[in-house]
Image: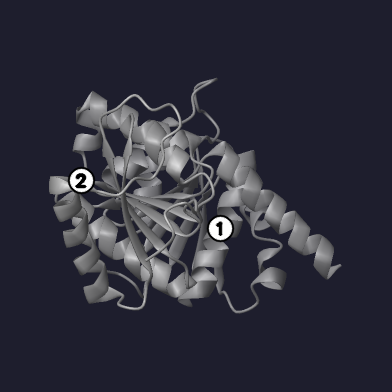
Amino acid sequence: MIDRTEPASGVVVGVDGDHATEGAVEWAAREADRCHVSLDLVQVLPGSQTVPALQEPTGRAHALLDQARRRVESVAPGVAVRISVVEGGVGAALVQVAERAALLVIGSSGPAIDVNPTVGRTVAHVLGHAACPVIVVPRLRRDDDGGPVLVGVDGSPDAVGAVDFAADVADRRQATLVALGVGPRLGAPTLEDMWRRQVAEAVAGIAEEYPDVPVREEVRRGNPDHEIVRGASGAQLIVLGSRGRGAITGALLGSTSQAVVSQAPCPVAVLSPRAADAWTRRLRSAAGTSS
């Protein structure tokens, strides 16, 4: 067992009684195994703690989390697991617990994420504020572990970190990286040239840092979220920045990210501005070291 006084530093997954949690737990367990890090299974209980602290689960919470732990043991028996509860609002508590984590994983029931405003607010808070990449695992997901990793490129600052994170995942999974830019349906041919340059520039440094990762560049025209979901056919993961071009000023979750998360049949990784900045700085640091 992991010392409960230690903050979560590996993979954190939110656990509740919803069936969507089951897929999230399995995905998180396999990723923790790939990364050789620990796994925290966390349930958020109603409370008013402003700084949530990991606590020993009891009663029904312990039974639920222990069931999740057994699921982890069945798919990734070598992963060190800690089960805990925290008190507070779900979104804020998970963000706080994952402050020093490598990944935060949550489950999604699918389109209901947009229909239920409470669920929508919680997920939007997590995606927009987490210090690490957040993986949203749909309940009815495909199992395409051999597929590519697709990253949305739009020239925004968040996309820089998203590309590097996506390349890191592709390298670890021996997958192809697909960099996708989506331009407006109507526009001059020169605009398409601009988007192609933008995509090329976004992946320019990947070959040096990740020489074993095949990279494919694509440009599509149309609605960004529709084209990203269509472009991800057969993909094992979609990676996006939480705020791209066209996001409402001051919002922490762009409409494209929100729509893709609700529609995608595979897991979606979303990097908040904080997470994207951390990965951008990591990329620049690596480039400085190699030069």
Could you tell me which residue is drawn at 21 percent across and 39 percent down? 111
- Disc tally is 2
Could you tell me which residue is drawn at 46 percent across and 54 percent down? 103
Could you tell me which residue is drawn at 30 percent across and 53 percent down? 137
Instruction: Give whichever of 122, 271 is nearer the camera.
Output: 122
- Residue 81, position in %: x, y? 35, 65
For mark 2, what is the residue?
Answer: 16
Residue 241 visible in rendering: yes
Placement of 251 over or under 62, stated as above or below: above
Location of the C terminus by quadrant is bottom right
- Residue 100, position in %: x, y? 54, 49
Location of the N terminus by quadrant is bottom left
Placement of 124 over or under 174, stated as above or below: above
The amino acid type found where label 1 is placed reads: Phe
Instruction: Give whichever of 3, 80 is nearer the camera.
Output: 3
Q: State which tag comes first along the sequence, 2 or 1.
A: 2
- Residue 10, position in %: x, y? 47, 60
Determine the secondary structure under disc 1.
Answer: helix
- The circle drawn on residue 146 is none
Residue sitting at the far right: 291
Q: Is residue 14 left or right of residue 222?
A: left
Instruction: Give whichever of 109, 85 is nearer the camera.
Output: 85
Determine the secondary structure under disc 2.
Answer: loop
Residue 198 visible in rendering: no
- The circle drawn on residue 165 is 1
The amino acid type found where label 2 is placed reads: Asp
- Residue 113, position in %: x, y? 24, 36
